[in-house]
Image: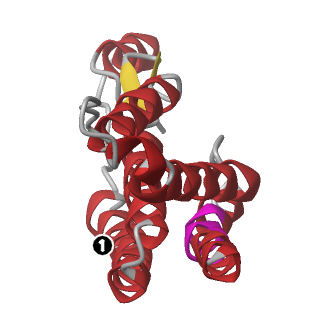
């Protein structure tokens, strides 16, 4: 049984590490190590949740709900994710990182519970979403427009001030 648990940990580390590698290559705060640790930790909690209480659950007078451990993983990961969300220059940053940390924990939990195929599919789909939507956003949102103004008897300084007020960058 221990060999199977080790395989689960290794697979969780690989699946979640792939997501972490993508985030690290993009220069995000939570990178390879963070994602590997979250995935492995989630897998460990699922293994304990699923198998760690078999001796206690066999007793008639004891009532435990092992799924409560898994539920607390989600809560704990929420705190880690929330720490990545910041407001900079009136823009919210870190939402995608917080979301992929949440998904990484889910992938670790799925693999830890023994559903390897689902965990691998989840990891691949997460990588596809991160890459495809990054490309789409980059292509659609980062268009540059060229505006040419000809001032006739105008004041160039006041026009530059107007651009600043409108938050138009050069």
Q: Residue at x 48, y 66 (%)?
A: 112
What is the x, y in percent for residue 85?
A: 45, 26
What is the x, y in percent for residue 84?
A: 52, 29
Q: Is residue 88 above or below residue 77?
A: above
Q: Residue at x 43, y 40 (%)?
A: 98
Total marks in image: 1
Q: Quadrant of residue 32?
A: bottom right
Magenta stretch contains residue 46: no
Q: In the rendered image, which quarter contains the N terminus?
A: bottom right
What is the x, y in percent for residue 30?
A: 64, 45
Name the secondary structure under disc 1: helix
User: Can see residue 145?
Assistant: no
- Foreground residue among 87 and 85: 85
What is the x, y in percent for residue 159?
A: 35, 19
- Foreground residue among 128 and 114: 114
Q: Residue furthest right?
A: 33
Residue topped by disc 1? 136
Q: Residue at x 35, y 38 (%)?
A: 74
Q: Quadrant of residue 118?
A: bottom left
Q: Which secondary structure is most common in the magenta stretch? A: helix
Q: Is residue 62 above or below residue 49?
A: above
Question: Position of 30 compared to 19: left or right?
Answer: right
Q: Residue furthest front?
A: 60
User: Can see residue 86?
Assistant: yes
The scheme the figure's colours follow is secondary structure
User: Mark 1: few, some, or many residues within 10 Å (few <14, many ≥20)?
Assistant: few
- Foreground residue among 117 and 20: 117
In magenta, the rendered stretch is 13-20
Q: Residue furthest bottom?
A: 117
């Amino acid at each position: 049984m221990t060999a199977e648990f080790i395989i689960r940990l290794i697979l969780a580390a690989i699946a979640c590490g792939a997501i972490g590698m993508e985030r690290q290559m993009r220069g995000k705060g939570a990178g390879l190590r963070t994602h590997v640790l979250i995935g492995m930790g989630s897998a460990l909690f699922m293994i304990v949740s699923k198998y760690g209480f078999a001796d206690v659950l066999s007793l008639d007078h004891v009532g435990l709900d092992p799924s409560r451990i898994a539920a607390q993983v989600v809560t704990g990961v929420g705190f880690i994710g929330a720490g990545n969300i910041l407001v900079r220059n009136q823009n919210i940053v870190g939402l995608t990182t917080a979301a992929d940390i949440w998904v990484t924990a889910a992938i670790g939990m799925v693999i830890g519970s023994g559903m390897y195929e689902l965990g691998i599919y989840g990891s691949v789909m997460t990588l596809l979403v991160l890459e495809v939507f990054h490309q789409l956003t980059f292509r659609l949102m980062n268009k540059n427009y060229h505006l040419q103004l000809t001032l006739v008897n105008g004041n160039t300084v006041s026009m530059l001030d107007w651009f600043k007020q409108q938050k138009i960058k050069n």
